[in-house]
Amino acid sequence: MKYIAERTGRYCLSLPSNRLGLYLALRHWCKPGQRLLMSPISADEILFLVLAAGLRPVIAPLSPRDGNIDVARVDLGTVDAVLTTNLYGLPDDAPAFAGKILVEDVAHAMESSIQGRPLGTFGQAAVFSLSKHPSAGSGGVLVVDDVSDLEALARARDELTVRGSLRADLWSVAGSMVRHAALKFDLVRPALKLARSLGLQEKREGYRIALDPDGLKSALKQAPSLPPFDRWVHADLHRYRARRGRLARWYQARRVTGVPEGRARRLAGVQRLAELPTVAPAVLDDLSRPLFRVPLLVRDRDAAIAELERHGVATGYLYDPPYDDYAPGFTEPSPDPEPARWWARHVLPVDPMYAARAFPILRRLEPPDGPPGCR
């Protein structure tokens, strides 16, 4: 994609999904059995991709300021590689991981920077999502510095992708367009009801998909291999390895082109939400970041979500509980899990593009008691 290539100054590899790109990067730069430091707060499928790559997930302590890795409390000498999350667009401290294999997940952070340097330019590889800021429904981009890495990753991509179809592309594009229309015309509530009745949203236990420890142990015997993990990795995107045709690629390119055009509106939403007493502290560090979501920290998060839905405001991208509580035995747990539990229980991510619609409800919410150790 031209926009991402120009922003990062790196070679770009187009992919059916961000998920496939993360797996390819982990397999390319890491060896099975290596220890990978990662945040306890991220999407379900990311953990399963790490396991599929044959790596040992080492769960980092979390900073309650931003929901990312608390670098000051990490012993980098005990790990081989790092996977950043850049939660909701708030940047991990990528420069602090210099000297380690670093894979940047910039799904939430397409437009975020650190001291003027774009995220996605610090690690050996970075992976963007076209379903987040661009809202293209699917698609990912893996960026690297070396053409030989690009060629090797393209071969690995082609081995793992499966045949797509025009019907699937039509469904993906139409679904994305319907979501945009629902948001534009304030039809979120009926759209959510329809999606749930049609089974278009993955069934979850709370905010996580069912783990199935026995099935996961069986899949681990085949690692490093991605297909045995498909049932976990494909949540809400069952065709995450399917090649996209011309229609889908055209739509993705069109949506990415519109990202800079929406920057001013996104920034305005960030700045308005930053006025709230519940906003996560790190948001205030730099109000020039056009965040994917603005994290608020509220006393009764689940009640707030229900109230927002009743007023046509959807909430997503919740990762509760943290990985070490979600998948005990499959991770090396955090040395201090309480800040992550606190964050997962209280965070309310709000789309800054629709801040005005949510604001009358959000301004009534109260902050929770402070994080562990800060009360």
Image (cartoon, rainbow, N blue to C red):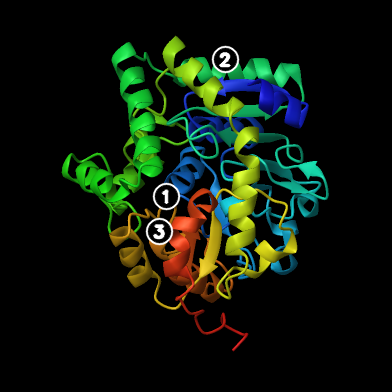
Residue 306 appears in view:
yes
Q: Residue at x 51, y 43 (%)?
A: 50
Q: Amino acid at mark 3?
A: Ala
Classify 10 Å Cα crowding around label 2: few (below 14), some (14-19), many (20 and above): few
Which mark is first along the chain, 2 or 1?
Answer: 1
Check whether the beta carbons of the residues at disc 1 and disc 3 lie within 8 A of each other: no
Kindly identify which residue carries mark 2. 155
Give the number of the disc on residue 44.
1
Picture residue at 74% right of the left edge, 46% below the top: 113
First in sequence: mark 1 vs mark 3? 1
Quick check: 228 left or right of 74? left
What residue sits right under mark 3 in the picture? 327
Q: Residue 94, how many percent across, how many down? A: 74, 50
> Where in the figure is residue 5, as x and y percent of width and height?
71, 24
CA separation, marks 1 and 2?
A: 27 Å
Element under label 1?
helix
Instruction: List x then y, in percent, for residue 214.
Output: 28, 50
Q: Does dot 3 land on a helix, a strand or a loop?
A: loop
